[in-house]
Amino acid sequence: MIKFNKMKKQKIVFWTTTGLFTLSMLMSANMYLTNEEVKIGFITHLGIPDYLRIELAVAKILGSLTLILPFVPKEFKFFAYAGFTINLISASVAHIALGDPIGEVIKPMLFLAILIASFLYYNLLYNSNEKHDEAKN
């Protein structure tokens, strides 16, 4: 019974953190594609070519689907976690380099913390499921 409760807690934390993170990335991708102010900010403030804005939006959509869909192989999930980590660290570095307010620097790091929690709990669940499957055999 104790193991079941522990696993249930792990699932709740995993799905909560993963859900929050993927929702935020999907909202971000939507803004990249539909919000004119974001488009202008990419080009003028960040100095990033417009095509990269679209590439980032597509990558965020694909990465979010990879994390949230349970049938996606774990190797693909690891690539999505790595890609989001690079994206979020790069966002903070860009805001630091441009001298943006501290809130703009910290925001990606907060999302990175949520992503790390999702990753850690994904590994806990995946490893406990593997052990459970081995015990059956």
Image (cartoon, rainbow, N blue to C red):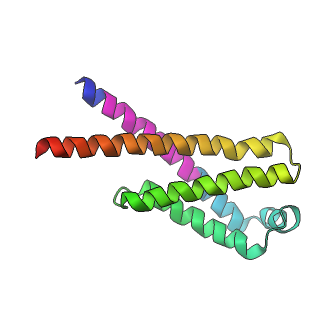
Q: Nearer the viewer, residue 36 or 13?
A: 13
Q: Is residue 10 inside the magenta stretch?
A: yes
Left or right: residue 41 versus residue 55 is: right
Left or right: residue 136 versus residue 48 is: left
Give residue 32's position: percent from left, percent from top: 70, 64
Rendered view: 8 above or below 129: above
**What residue is drawn where x is 65% and y is 57%?**
87
**What residue is drawn where x is 26% and y is 28%?**
3
Looking at the image, which residue sits at the far left? 137
Q: Quadrant of the N terminus?
A: top left
Looking at the image, which residue sits at the far top? 2
What range of the chain is rendered magenta? 6-23
Q: Nearer the viewer, residue 97 or 64?
A: 97
Looking at the image, which residue sits at the far bottom? 51
Give residue 92's position: percent from left, percent from top: 74, 49
Give residue 110's position: percent from left, percent from top: 65, 40
Give residue 75's position: percent from left, percent from top: 40, 60
